[in-house]
Image (spheres, grey):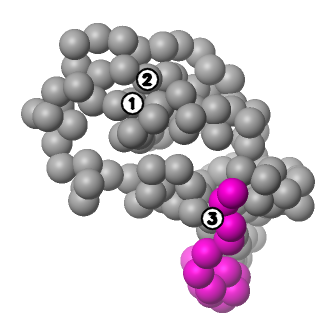
């Protein structure tokens, strides 16, 4: 089975966006991109690589205004602490967070996906969950 290992986010200000994910979720900056195509940062939690890029080439950027990432999810141990960090980073909860707790997945051992959604930098929504999502396990 394939495993998700990389997510790319288009950012107007890669340093600001990379620092947001580093400060709020304790991701480590593991690399820097600076080429004719793009500039930015690579972050990791040790399992997933997140590229935060500002494309210099319109062809490489594609239709990022409309076809970029909608949201990404982070499983955390301390949801209250992350909520405080999100709010300090001017990221407030959005939407009906209760709807997530009412959605069933059909998995008896983890029958609900429970997450809080926040507005993140560059229009990327961020889900934060203590339980995780169906099909995922905490490492």
- What's drawn in magenta, residue-wise? 90-105
* Residue 40, disc: 2
Image point 71% across, 50% down: which residue?
A: 89
Image point 16% across, 27% down: which residue?
A: 57
Q: Quadrant of the N terminus?
A: top left
Residue at the disc numbered 1: 53
Image point 59% across, 81% down: which residue?
A: 95
Residue at the disc numbered 3: 118
Residue 25: image location, x then y, percent: 73, 41
Secondary structure of the residue carrying tag 1 is strand
Main SS category, magenta section:
loop
Is residue 127 among what the camera can see? Answer: no
Residue 70 vertical placement versus 8 (above, below): below
**Dot placed on the residue nearer the N-terminal end, 1 or 3:** 1
**Dot placed on the residue nearer the N-terminal end, 3 or 2:** 2
Residue 103 vertical placement versus 22 (above, below): below
Dot 2, how many residues are within 10 Å of its Cα: few (below 14), some (14-19), or many (20+)? many
Taking depth in this image into account, of 97 and 109 the one nearest to the observer is 97
**Dot placed on the residue nearer the N-terminal end, 1 or 2:** 2
Q: Distance of mark 1 from mark 2, alpha carbons?
A: 4 Å
Q: Are marks 1 and 2 in contact (CB under 8 Å)?
A: yes
Taking depth in this image into account, of 52 and 12 the one nearest to the observer is 12
> Is 19 on the left or on the right of 125, as rendered?
right
């Amino acid at each position: 089975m394939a495993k998700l290992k990389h997510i790319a986010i288009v950012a107007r200000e890669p340093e600001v966006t990379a620092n947001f994910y580093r400060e709020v979720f304790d991701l480590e900056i593991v690399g820097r991109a600076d080429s004719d195509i793009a500039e930015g940062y690579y972050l990791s939690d040790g399992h997933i690589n997140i590229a935060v890029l500002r494309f210099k080439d319109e062809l490489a950027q594609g239709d990022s205004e409309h076809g970029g990432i909608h949201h990404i999810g982070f499983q955390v141990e301390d949801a209250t602490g992350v909520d405080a960090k999100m709010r300090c980073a001017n990221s407030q909860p959005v939407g009906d967070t209760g709807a997530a707790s009412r959605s069933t997945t059909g998995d008896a051992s983890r029958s609900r996906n429970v997450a809080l959604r926040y507005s993140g930098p560059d229009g990327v929504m961020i889900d934060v969950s203590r339980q995780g999502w169906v099909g995922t396990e905490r490492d």
